[in-house]
Amino acid sequence: MKDPRDIIIAPIVSEKSYALIETGVYTFNVHVDASKPEIHDAVEAIWGVKVVKVNTLNRAGKVQRTRGTNRPGRRPGTKRAIVTLAAGNEIPLFENN
């Protein structure tokens, strides 16, 4: 079994993801090869919450020009997971200590 912290890389920080947090939906940057059941189990293992649903989306990397030769290069693609939690569950992502 993979380590859960290798599957969940980082939370997504954007206005849209903050609006979803209030409804119990969290967005994470995940490993490209991670499957929905692996993401489900990783979130439950790390934070001890009940996950209802996991949606994923693959984002292609941007094409960028290189500086010296002007040839196209490509940034790596990423994968996002949109995780819906059961009512009453919450992940303490951005708390002040």
Image (cartoon, rainbow, N blue to C red):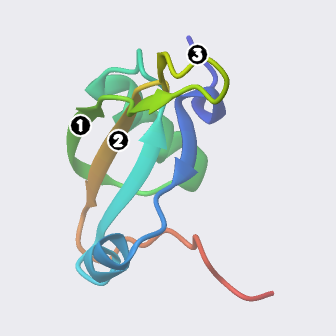
In this figure, which residue is indicated by the disc labeled 2?
Answer: 80
Looking at the rendered structure, the secondary structure element under dot 1 is strand
* Distance Cα–Cα, label 1 vs label 2: 6 Å
Q: For this view, does 64 lie left or right of residue 88?
A: right
Say which mark, if any, is on residue 21: none
Q: Earlier in the sequence, mark 3 or mark 2?
A: 3
Identify whether 88 is placed above or below 80.
below
Measuring 59% from the left and 46% from the top, which residue is drawn there? 46
* Distance Cα–Cα, label 1 vs label 3: 18 Å
Question: Which image quadrant is residue 90 in?
Answer: bottom left
Q: Earlier in the sequence, mark 1 or mark 2?
A: 1
Query: Where is residue 32 shown, x and y percent of the image?
Result: 42, 21
Q: For this view, does 50 lie left or right of residue 45?
A: left
Q: Label 1 is placed on what type of residue? A: Thr
Q: Residues within 10 Å of mark 2 (few under 14, many from 20)?
A: many
In this figure, which residue is indicated by the disc labeled 1?
Answer: 56
Check contact, mark 1 vs mark 2: CB within 8 A. yes
Q: Residues within 10 Å of mark 1 (few under 14, many from 20)?
A: some
In this figure, which residue is indicated by the disc labeled 3?
Answer: 2
Identify whether 50 is placed above or below 80.
below
Instruction: Using the image as rendered, state which of residue 87 and residue 58 is in the foreground.
Output: 58
* Distance Cα–Cα, label 3 vs label 2: 18 Å
Looking at the rendered structure, the secondary structure element under dot 3 is loop
Q: For this view, does 2 lie left or right of residue 20?
A: right
Query: Where is residue 45 shown, x and y percent of the image?
Result: 54, 41
Question: Which image quadrant is residue 44 in?
Answer: top left
Quarter of the image with the N terminus in it: top right
Measuring 43% from the left and 57% from the top, which residue is drawn there? 49
Query: Where is residue 55 shown, x and y percent of the image?
Result: 19, 42
Q: Label 2 is placed on what type of residue? A: Arg
Check contact, mark 1 vs mark 3: CB within 8 A. no
Which residue appears farthest toward the front when viewing the image? 69
